[in-house]
Amino acid sequence: MNKGKVLSINISKKKGEMKEPLSEGNFIEDFGLEGDAHGGKWHRQVSLLAQESIDIMTSLGAEGLCFGNFAENITTHGITLHEIPVGAKIKIGQTLQEVTQIGKECHADQGCAVAQKVGKCIMPTQGIFTRIIKGGIVKIGDEIEIIKD
């Protein structure tokens, strides 16, 4: 699918903490989400994960998952994030973002808390990362659209 919507915007002030939901976020050009510990001048300014991926983890036995449990800044619905190619541009709310990475290794040797509980984690294969090309506000319910060059 080429369109989706924002279900949640999530932030953590320190790395290694669970992210907490916001009603909207200010995304700063070449930084990421204002106030988020993972923001900065690097290629993984914003992390995104689809609700459909979270649902896979729930079906594997992970219980009580909430927005931000996978440390994603934006939780989406209706768009297959991990199929968007690196280098693609996506419009989310007022922002324009470029996909810079698909997936990542778990941060701990034994895997994250979710991987320890159910044997795997979806973020390493289905989460994506972006950098902010044009900043602005993103709100819950905003449309996500892949931009054709």
Image (cartoon, rainbow, N blue to C red):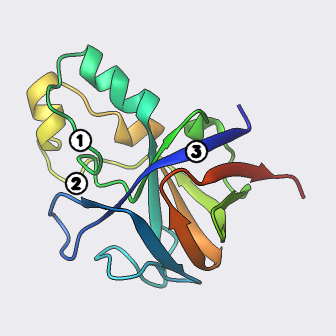
Q: Quadrant of residue 12?
A: bottom left
In the rendered view of the protein, which quadrant contains the C terminus? bottom right
Q: Residue at x 28, y 77 (%)?
A: 37
Q: Residue at x 43, y 83 (%)?
A: 40
Q: Position of residue 128 (x, y in %)?
A: 50, 50
Q: Which badge, 2 or 3, is on the more N-terminal residue?
A: 3
State the CA–CA distance, disc 2 to disc 1.
19 Å
Q: Which badge, 2 or 1, is on the more N-terminal residue?
A: 1
Q: Is residue 1 above or below residue 108?
A: above
Q: Which residue is mark 3?
A: 5
Q: Residue at x 43, y 67 (%)?
A: 24
Q: Quadrant of residue 83?
A: top right
Residue 66 tag number: 1
Q: Position of residue 60 (x, y in %)?
A: 24, 16
Q: Which residue is mark 2?
A: 107
Q: Nearer the viewer, residue 48 or 85?
A: 48
The secondary element bearing badge 2 is classed as loop
Instruction: Evaluate if marks 1 and 3 touch, with contact meaning CB atoms under 8 Å apart.
Output: no
Q: Residue at x 59, y 78 (%)?
A: 136
Residue type at mark 1 is Cys
Residue type at mark 2 is His
Q: Is residue 19 above or below residue 75?
A: below
Residue type at mark 3 is Lys
